[in-house]
Image: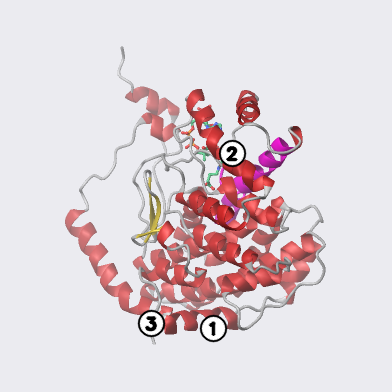
């Protein structure tokens, strides 16, 4: 059976040889130059690391292992994880085997719940998720094997074990946090016959007779899976992992970055902005009022959350997928209608202002309105959903980096004094 473990064991050695050959024979070829503006500007556009799980093209958005994300919207998140790791979609048997792995590993230790319950009641759900991940570090198979003394070529194996354990437990923990933090009552146990995303939806306990909330969760978890290697969460996870820190330490680092308002937290900020607009205008405003309100936001020195991107220069296809979901299932919902209207107005405003390089919506612009419709109104929780999905990207990248023996991250920094010396005298 082509289990994930077996398939990785087959594809890793030739891939390693290929990379060895490339660096040995062509290592001197230049792939990037760095300007002073880039050094001060978050290294935007500098090609200085490898990520084989996905690429983000400025004019097309996320491509996972050669598949545009719009071609994957019907896939289960388990299929996506297999694809991220191997470059192939699993056959039925491999999918079933992976689902069994998740189901067998889903039990979360009591000590994790005890820690979460001891946290202050106003802790942010992302801080709770991160704490749970970090406190489970004691379970790391990578650390155990490393401490025993393991051969370098075997590093990826316990990393895969840690990844499967984490992915199996994350929805259970994340759903538990939702119920605990927002007083939803007792935790709901997983069901053996449900897939990963449907189980998460079930454990959250959102009542939905239509079954469309579970569909939304499948779409949500699929769309947020990965976004190449240089975004804040992936890069943080990568850097920490490059020190051979295990999956728990590394993913925790990534989650801390995802919790920032310019990154994953933008989805909570986004719905906040939409609801603020609704409140101000007592419902969906006219295009004219919306135009003025968007300008007010910019003039008050704030960003319009959900718009702009460090890499993309077109409407994020993930936003397009959420918009299509809303149009299909909840076209009459006023909050969703406002999201669609904002899409008509805000890019014009941002373009007129002329500062932003990408005036188009990113993934965070629309997802909140959909969750809100199905009764998940606690928007500080939204980034947790993002995190559960993005763990797939972070972990698949970690597995591959361990397999390839990726070097410890250590770019060179320079001082402003040094920069000044590079500027020719005029
Ligand atoms: N609203 C107002 N101003 C914006 C803006 C927005 N949505 N997006 C960018 N700008 C501004 C920047 O703040 C910057 O202003 P200054 O020159 O005064 O510093 C200027 O436009 C140029 O920025 P940029 O090069 O176009 O964008 P960056 O690559 O620096 O930043 C991002 C990208 C996403 C942080 C930025 O567009 C932003 O803050 N967007 C709103 C927050 C958001 O939606 N984040 C989620 C991104 C997706 C994700 O990672 O999860």
- Give the magenta part as a residue range: 252-278
Residue 71 magenta = no
Horizontal and vertical percent position of residue 200 = 64, 70
Reading the image, the residue beneath label 2 is: 341
As drawn, the residue found furthest toward the bottom would be: 1
Reading the image, the residue beneath label 3 is: 6
| Mark 2 in CB contact with mark 3 (< 8 angstroms) | no
Image disc number at residue 82 = none
Location of residue 377 with respect to 47 vertically, above or below:
below
Image disc number at residue 100 = 1
Residue 143 in view (yes/no): yes
Going from the N terminus, do you reach mark 3 or mark 1 first?
A: 3
Which of labels 3 and 1 is toward the front? Answer: 1
Q: Secondary structure at mark 3?
A: helix
x 76%, y 54%: residue: 123
Quarter assignment of residue 423? top left
Count of numbered tags: 3
Horizontal and vertical percent position of residue 209 = 70, 69
Q: CA distance from mark 2 to mark 1?
A: 43 Å
Q: CA distance from mark 3 to mark 1?
A: 15 Å
Residue 254 magenta = yes
Going from the N terminus, do you reach mark 2 or mark 1 first?
A: 1
x 24%, y 69%: residue: 17
Q: Secondary structure at mark 1?
A: helix
Q: CA distance from mark 2 to mark 3?
A: 49 Å
Horizontal and vertical percent position of residue 143 = 53, 72
As drawn, the residue found furthest toward the front would be: 332
């Amino acid at each position: 059976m082509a289990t994930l473990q077996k398939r990785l064991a087959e594809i890793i050695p030739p891939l390693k040889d290929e990379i060895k050959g490339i660096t040995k024979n062509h290592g001197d070829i230049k792939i990037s130059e760095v300007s002073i503006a880039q050094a001060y500007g978050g290294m935007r556009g500098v090609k200085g690391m490898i990520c084989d799980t996905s690429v983000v093209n400025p004019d097309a958005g996320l491509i996972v292992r050669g598949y545009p994300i719009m071609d994957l919207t019907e896939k289960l998140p388990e299929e996506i994880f297999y694809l991220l790791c191997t470059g192939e979609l699993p056959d039925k048997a491999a999918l079933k085997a992976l689902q069994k792995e998740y189901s067998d590993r889903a039990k979360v230790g009591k000590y994790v719940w005890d820690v979460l319950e001891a946290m202050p009641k106003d802790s942010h759900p992302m801080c709770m998720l991160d704490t749970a991940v970090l406190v489970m570090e004691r379970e790391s198979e990578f650390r155990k094997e490393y401490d025993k003394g393991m051969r370098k070529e075997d590093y990826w194996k316990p990393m895969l074990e840690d990844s499967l354990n984490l992915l199996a437990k994350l929805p259970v923990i994340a759903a538990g946090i939702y119920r605990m933090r927002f007083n939803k009552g007792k935790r709901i146990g997983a069901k053996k016959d449900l897939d990963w995303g449907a189980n998460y939806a079930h454990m959250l306990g959102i009542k939905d007779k239509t079954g469309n909330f579970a569909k939304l969760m499948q779409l949500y978890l699929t769309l947020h899976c990965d976004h190449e290697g240089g975004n804040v969460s992936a890069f943080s996870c990568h850097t920490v992992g490059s020190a051979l820190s295990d999956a728990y330490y590394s993913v925790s680092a990534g989650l801390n970055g995802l919790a920032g308002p310019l990154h994953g937290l933008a989805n909570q900020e986004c719905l906040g902005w939409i609801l603020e607009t609704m409140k101000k205008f007592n419902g969906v405003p006219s295009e004219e009022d919306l135009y003025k309100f968007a300008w007010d936001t910019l003039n008050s020195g704030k960003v319009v959350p959900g718009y702009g991107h460090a890499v993309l220069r077109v409407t994020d296809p993930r936003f397009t997928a959420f918009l299509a979901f809303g149009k299909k299932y909840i076209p009459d919902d006023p909050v969703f209608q406002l999201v669609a209207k904002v899409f008509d107005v805000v890019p014009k405003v941002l373009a007129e202002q002329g500062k932003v390089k990408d005036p188009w919506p990113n993934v965070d612009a629309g997802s909140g309105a959909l969750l809100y419709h199905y009764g998940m109104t606690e928007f500080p929780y939204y980034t947790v959903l993002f995190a559960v999905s993005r763990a797939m990207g972070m972990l698949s990248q970690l597995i591959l980096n361990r397999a390839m023996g990726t070097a410890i991250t250590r770019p060179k920094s320079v001082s402003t004094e040094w920069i000044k010396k590079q500027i020719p005298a005029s």
